[in-house]
Image (cartoon, rainbow, N blue to C red):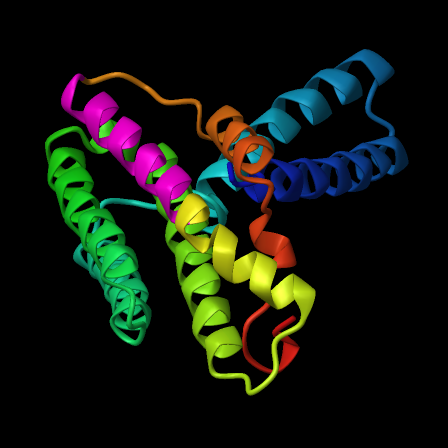
Amino acid sequence: MKQFQKRYIYSAILASVFFLILYLVLSIIGIDLIIRLLVSIMLTIGVYVGGILFFKEEDVRELTGDNINNYYYLASKVNSEALRTEDEDIKNKTEEITKLTDSILVSLSQRPKKVESTFDFFDYYLDISYKILYKYNSIKAKEEQTKDDKKFITSTKKYLDNILEAFKKQSKNMQEAKMLDIDTEIKIFEKTSGINKENVKVGDKDE
């Protein structure tokens, strides 16, 4: 999902505190009200803009080798989970997702302005792909499966089909230099597939 821009909040808080302190100091000194306001406002604006630049790393991600490698790593985790299954269809779908991940990253290197949008896409879809496959393998390993377990196993391929479709759409848009509204696409995916990544637990919290 689109990341909340924390740097603007941090900068606003810093600028507000600065304004109050500066205004109070100028009041104590006895500076005229109009001058006091003008000086405080002008310097506060400078602090706010400076704060945005200072806190930039809190939000803005860049097209670095570390970030690229991180998404290749996440894709490899998804593929590793798929290889644990005995279902060739699942393996094939996941292999295609992995290939599309590479294609999207290659396109991104040619159009780096789409970094935030593309990283948001990977953050959601690679994560939910891993969770779905992890849960699928965990359920398959159970000696006894509940009704919900069986429903999840039956739905897994549908989930992967929807994810694969999202990857194809993202790859096509990248190649055509179009911007994809990730938030809207994710809402459509969740409505269509009937699954939300926040509700798919892994590890000890697996459901």
Q: Quadrant of the C terminus?
A: bottom right
Q: Quadrant of residue 15?
A: top right
* 43, 86: nearer the viewer: 86
Q: Quadrant of residue 87?
A: bottom left
* 18, 6: nearer the viewer: 6
125 over 138 or under it: above or below: above
Where residue 19 appears, as percent x and y from the top left, is 75, 34
Q: Is residue 175 left or right of residue 117?
A: left
Q: Which residues are magenta?
A: 160-176
What's the residue at 49%, 77% (across, down)?
138
Where residue 82 appears, as percent x and y from the top left, is 30, 66
81 over 64 or under it: above or below: below
What's the residue at 26%, 16% (across, down)?
178
Would residue 165 be counted in the magenta stretch? Answer: yes
Give the main secondary structure of the magenta stretch. helix
* 152, 179: nearer the viewer: 152
Q: Is residue 90 left or right of residue 206?
A: left
Q: Is residue 137 left or right of residue 47?
A: left
